[in-house]
Amino acid sequence: MDRLQELKEQPVKDEKEIADITSRIADIDKELTSVSDIEPGTENLVQVMIAFGNRFSAKTGKEINKPQKMVFSFGEWQLFKQSFKRLGYQITKVINDPFNDAKELVNKD
């Protein structure tokens, strides 16, 4: 009978966990938005937030690798977008995309 009760309570536990994760994602988005100001003179450069490796801990769900702002010239951007996945980077947010090709590379996971 205890196992049956556990199974009945599982959806409530899952719902609470999803709400907690959603709240953490909202906090991270607020943090990332505060960095999103485009500095004068960098309007023609690609500016993205990138994280290296696993962004969140598999055991705790906490963020272990915070995204950092990176700025690329056209040539640097062409090289980076060809190899960033292979090198273990994830693009988490696009701040400035003058060449209109960065948005499609944002990690959706």
Image (cartoon, helix red, strand yellow):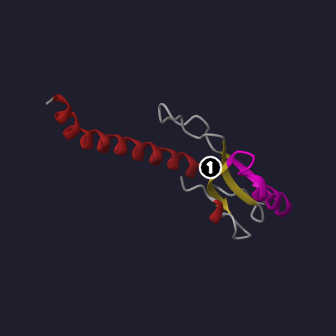
Q: Residue 97, relative to residue 9: is it above or below?
A: below
Residue that sits furthest to the right in the current view: 75
Q: Is residue 74 left or right of residue 97?
A: right
Say which quadrant the N terminus sits in.
Answer: top left
80 or 4, which is in the foreground? Answer: 4
Q: Is residue 59 left or right of residue 89?
A: left
Q: Position of residue 92 (x, y in %)?
A: 61, 52
Residue that sits furthest to the bottom in the current view: 100
- Please name the amino acid that badge 1 sits on: Val
Q: Position of residue 4 (x, y in %)?
A: 17, 35
Q: Residue at x 57, y 49 (%)?
A: 32
Residue 78 falls inside the magenta stretch: yes
Question: Mark 1 — residue?
Answer: 35
Q: Residue 89, relative to residue 39: is it above or below?
A: above
Residue 17, quarter of the rendered image: top left
39 or 65, which is in the foreground? Answer: 65
Q: Residue 48, relative to residue 25: is it above or below?
A: below
The residue range painted magenta reads 69-89
Q: Residue 6, relative to residue 32: is it above or below?
A: above
Q: Residue at x 81, y 62 (%)?
A: 78
Q: Is residue 19 left or right of residue 76?
A: left
Residue 9, quarter of the rendered image: top left
